[in-house]
Image (spheres, rainbow, N blue to C red):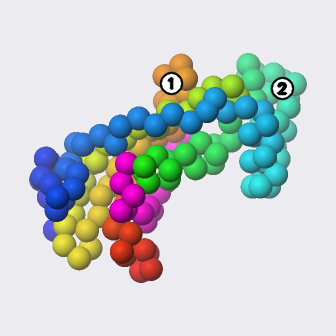
């Protein structure tokens, strides 16, 4: 069952509620190198300032999936009783190495009952405030994790 705006989900958050802001970083070149090694994404654009400059960037950009990985700990800090069931994102602007990533979001839909879920609109901004990643995530109670 879908709830109207402002309706609570049990005793929890309601539509329109913010998850607050969580900052990660600043992200250093060493962080990008470690991420490249772990992920297999060793695109020189992210690792070599010369390649980034040749592409018209002031510095190597932070990997998009590294920025996306910041959503999970931010959401876990906000609501440790919920897990991400689905997430999707659009990458809008690069964030250069040396910047921080600021995660924020709001609840846009909530359902209750045995299939209770929250749909959140999430954002990742660079230090300059530019929107870098726009995402949506569906969160479900951790007790449903096995079925997700």
- Rendering coords of residue 121 (x, y %): 36, 45
For label 2, count other residues whose C-alpha is less than 10 Å away and answer few (under 14), some (14-19) or many (20+). some
**What residue is at 26 percent from the left and 73 percent from the top?**
115
- Rendering coords of residue 19 (x, y %): 34, 43
**What residue is at 75 percent from the left and 40 percent from the top?**
32
In this picture, which residue range is highlighted in magenta?
78-92
Tell whether position 84 is magenta.
yes
For label 1, count other residues whose C-alpha is less than 10 Å away and answer few (under 14), some (14-19) or many (20+). few
Query: Is residue 26 shown left or right of residue 19?
Result: right
Q: List the residue tagged with mark 1.
A: 130
Of mark 2 and mark 1, the one earlier in the sequence is: 2
Callout 2: helix, strand or loop?
A: helix
Q: Can you tell which quarter of the image residue 93 is in? A: top right
Task: Please indicate, yes or no, whether residue 89 appears anywhere in the rendered image.
Answer: no
Is 64 or 56 nearer to us in this picture?
64
140 in relation to 106, above or below:
below
Looking at the image, which residue sits at the far bottom?
Answer: 147
**What residue is at 53 percent from the left and 19 percent from the top?**
128
Task: Please indicate, yes or no, whether residue 142 appears anywhere in the rendered image.
Answer: yes
Callout 1: helix, strand or loop?
A: loop
- Rendering coords of residue 91 (x, y %): 56, 40
Q: List the residue tagged with mark 2.
A: 49
Query: Is residue 127 shown left or right of residue 55?
Result: left
146 in relation to 48, above or below:
below
Picture quarter with the C terminus: bottom left
């Amino acid at each position: 069952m879908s709830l109207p705006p402002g309706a609570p989900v049990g005793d929890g958050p309601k539509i329109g509620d913010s998850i607050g802001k969580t900052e990660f970083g600043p992200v250093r070149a060493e962080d990008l190198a470690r991420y490249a090694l772990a992920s297999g994404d060793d695109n020189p654009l992210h690792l070599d300032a010369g390649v980034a400059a040749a592409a018209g960037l002031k510095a190597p950009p932070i990997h998009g999936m590294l920025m996306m990985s910041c959503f999970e700990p931010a959401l876990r800090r906000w609501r440790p009783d919920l897990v991400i069931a689905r997430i999707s994102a659009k990458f809008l602007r690069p964030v250069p190495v040396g910047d921080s990533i600021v995660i924020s979001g709001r609840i846009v839909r909530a359902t209750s009952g045995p299939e209770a879920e929250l749909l959140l609109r999430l954002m990742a901004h660079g230090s300059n405030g530019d929107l870098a990643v726009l995402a949506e995530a569906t969160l479900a109670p951790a007790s449903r994790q096995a079925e997700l």
